[in-house]
Image (cartoon, rainbow, N blue to C red):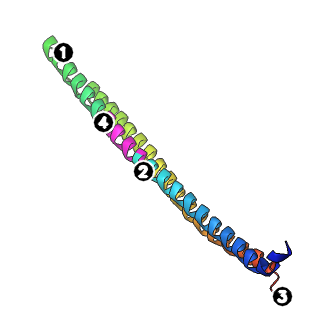
């Protein structure tokens, strides 16, 4: 093994550089995984928004049908329609529709915030990879005997 002694500093430097490159690549990989997950979460946010929009639209359509049926039944019975009960029904239906919309906005916003957090964590992991690389490089080089 004595024949390797002249190469020891070069081997030590190579080891430190290899470790640093590995830390950088690991940070980049973590950022890419986080970006992928953020993309999935953005798609989920859009899907939730569309799903709740459809639910609100369906609910409104069903309540419009119910209201038309109530009006028709009152008209067919010969009862003079008073606005009170119909107005109460309309207000309650609108309140429920707005609750459906708000639920969709909350779900969509939550997924968007999770996507932002994933992107942030990915960028932080990448930066930390550079920090680990620098620290590993300095640590590895400090152990090399250049004499």
Residue 128: where, in percent of width, then height? 64, 67
Query: Label 3 to label 4, Cα distance in Å?
Result: 75 Å
Residue at (76% x, 74% y) in the render: 140
Q: Examine the structure image and report whether residue 40 is included in the region drawn in magenta.
A: no
Query: Label 2 to label 4, Cα distance in Å?
Result: 19 Å
Q: Is label 2 in a helix, a strand or a loop?
A: helix
User: Which residue in the protein does label 3 denote?
Assistant: 147
Q: Nearer the viewer, residue 146 or 137?
A: 146
Q: From the image, state whether disc 1 or disc 2 is nearer to you.
A: 2
Mark 2 or mark 4: whose residue is earlier in sequence: 2
SS majority, magenta: helix
Residue 144: where, in percent of width, then height? 80, 79
Mark 3 or mark 4: whose residue is earlier in sequence: 4
Q: Nearer the viewer, residue 112 or 145?
A: 145
User: Which residue in the protein does label 4 denote?
Assistant: 54
Mark 3 or mark 1: whose residue is earlier in sequence: 1
Q: Nearer the viewer, residue 47 or 90?
A: 47
Q: Is residue 63 visible?
A: yes
Q: From the image, state whether disc 3 or disc 2 is nearer to you.
A: 3
Q: From the image, state whether disc 1 or disc 4 is nearer to you.
A: 4
Q: Is label 4 in a helix, a strand or a loop?
A: helix
Q: Quick one: quadrant of the N terminus? A: bottom right
Q: Is label 3 in a helix, a strand or a loop?
A: loop
Residue 90: where, in percent of width, then height? 28, 31
Query: Label 1 to label 4, Cα distance in Å?
Result: 28 Å
Residue lying at the far right of the rendered structure? 2
User: Which residue in the protein does label 1 denote?
Assistant: 73
Residue 141: where, in percent of width, then height? 76, 79
């Amino acid at each position: 093994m004595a024949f390797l002694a002249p190469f020891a500093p070069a081997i030590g430097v190579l080891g430190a550089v290899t470790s640093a490159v590995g830390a950088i690549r690991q940070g980049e990989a973590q950022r890419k995984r986080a970006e992928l997950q953020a993309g999935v979460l953005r798609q989920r946010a859009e899907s939730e928004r569309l799903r709740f929009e459809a639910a609100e639209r369906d609910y409104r359509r069903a309540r419009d049908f119910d209201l038309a049926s109530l009006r028709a039944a009152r008209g067919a019975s010969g009862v003079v329609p008073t606005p009170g009960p119909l107005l109460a029904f309309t207000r309650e239906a609108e309140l429920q529709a707005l609750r459906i919309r708000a639920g969709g906005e909350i779900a969509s916003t939550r997924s968007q915030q999770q996507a932002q957090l994933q992107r942030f964590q990915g960028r932080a992991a990448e930066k930390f990879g550079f920090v680990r690389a620098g620290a590993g490089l300095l640590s590895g080089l400090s152990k090399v005997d250049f004499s």
